[in-house]
Amino acid sequence: MDDREIVGPITRQRRVTLSNTRRGSLKNLNELNGRLNEKSDRAGKTKRKAQESQAENANEKNKRNGRGDKMSCHTLQESLLSSSSEFSNYRGILNWCVVMLVLSNARLFLENLLRYGILVDPIQIISLFLKDPYSWPAACLVIVCNVFIVVALYVERQLAKGSISEQFGMFIHFLNLSIILCFPMATVLCLPSITPVGASFALGVYTIVLLKLYSYKDVNKWCRERRQVRARSLSRSLSCPSSPTISSSSQTHVSYPGNLSLRDLYYFVFAPTLCYELNFPRSPRIRMGFLLRRLFEMLLLTQLLVGLIQQWMVPVIQSSMKPLQEMDYSRMVERLLRLAVPNHLIWLIFFYCFFHSSMNFMAEVLQFGDREFYRDWWNSETITYFWQNWNIPVHKWCLRHFYKPMLRRGGSKWASQSAVFFLSAFFHEYLVSVPLRMFRLWAFMGMMAQLPLAFFVGRYLRGNYGNAAVWMSLIIGQPIAVLMYVHDYYVLHYQELPQTTGL
Ligand SMILES: CC(C)(COP(=O)(O)OP(=O)(O)OC[C@H]1O[C@@H](n2cnc3c(N)ncnc32)[C@H](O)[C@@H]1OP(=O)(O)O)[C@@H](O)C(=O)NCCC(=O)NCCS
């Protein structure tokens, strides 16, 4: 008997044993699979089920390999990039996107440096705020705004005491709010020494104060209404915000009219919210590490923003003036796309710097507990979702003081939403047109265009397509508005357009 004859039956026997074992283990695995699948079905988590079966397939494969069975190496499975494979780990692709983004931007950065040299000039920032170092009109305007804050408090105190009627109090409040809206506008338009940047800062502060005082007026009015209801019904159960109570966190609770103090009002004025409350949620202590991190981010990102604007955005805008004036469409589109990148980057940095760093910094200093300044707007699949989630302080104010009151008065949902967007469009235009001292309605139209855009995206685009549409509207929409304003500003203020390098 030669070796092959001895080895042959042994090998066959081993194969039979192995295949029996495999069948057995497969049977066990199938049973396990069945049991696991039943469990998954009960839980209703189909995704988990797919992952488990994938893992089992892999296990099965490993076991087979371990036993040296090389006869079958295929299993029933989908390619990873097929949607039916339910594969969802694209972390590597995301990293690739980041690497590509960094590389392409590094190229743009180098190209920009080679073409324009270093344009960053920190001294120039001061001249953006001040024309004359001895005249600080924007700062003076901001200081004057305290008068209106004190007037609102005085009116509320008189209303609480019953010294003035509700109607008269409301009249004074609306007069005060109208002056807050018109006074800075008139000052900016009449005072040539105020720069556009200084003016937009002052107007921004006034707009925030306006929205805050409106909320202050509303909440105190609601408190008086509750007090009256309580007085009429003589019921303790309705005394909710008006009766002194001690919270579980043993922090003293303020009750109406005990809240009508300068300290309480100024806490609200500086707090990172537009909606007034008698008792804001408070964080237990100030975390120094957190505070310093936010401060560092604020300083660093502000410098980065200014540097990017000077080095990247301004040259692109300047080189876009000629094609815009000559209505050279292909060049216009090229310049628009060129501007879209720095503009979007600057907007993202601004978002982080303002909504994360600055607001958290203020909240930490004031131990203000509610840190929801933004939600996951970057996942927006509809325009509506974006506006509900990107600027939470404004959205909350719109809902609480404008949208819901309109709905309660019988307004339809569509009319109320349109009214909110109209108001928002008005303030966007106010904050851009007044500092630039020209009324072109680009910002107003941009905001109002959100309504049809929201309808279109909500109706025709879903999932990733919807998300891409939201990103497109942000990336392309903003530079269009920027170019329009800058072009009109140049045409209005400079007889000769700046000599551009062409490309
Ligand atoms: C217009 C706007 C307020 C709509 O918000 P929305 O969340 O889509 O509105 P919805 O219709 O879903 O309703 C929101 C709330 O109103 C309530 N509501 C709906 N109908 C109601 C009615 N008839 N009566 C009372 N409340 C009602 C809902 O229950 C919901 O309450 P909740 O927030 O407590 O859950 C929002 O899109 C917005 O804020 N837009 C402007 C944003 C903006 O300009 N930001 C500027 C950033 S720079």
Image: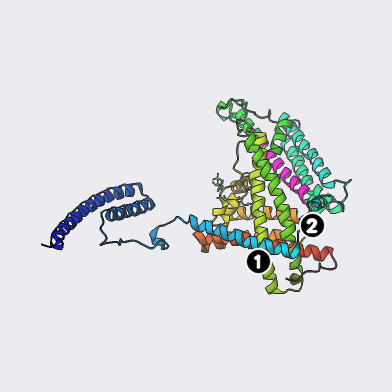
Q: Which residue has dot 1 on it?
A: 337
Q: Is residue 360 above or below residue 448?
A: above
Q: Main secondary structure of the magenta part?
A: helix
CA–CA distance between discs 2 and 1? 24 Å
Question: Along the horizontal axis of the image, is 131 left or right of 283?
Answer: right
Quadrant of the rendering where the N terminus is positioned: bottom left
Quarter of the rendering containing residue 14: bottom left
Name the residue rendered at 18%, 57% in the picture. 15
Q: Residue at x 81, y 57 (%)?
A: 437
Q: Is residue 83 magenta?
A: no
The answer to whether residue 471 is left or right of residue 300 is: left
Q: Nearer the viewer, residue 178 or 346?
A: 346
Task: Please state the extent of the stretch shown in magenta in the rendering.
Answer: 200-220
| Residue 451 image point, x, y percent | 61, 59
What is the secondary structure assignment of the residue under circle 2?
helix
Look at mark 2 in the image and give the residue it sits on: 436
Does residue 477 appear in the picture of this structure? no
Q: Amino acid type of disc 1?
A: Leu
Disc on the earlier residue, 2 or 1: 1
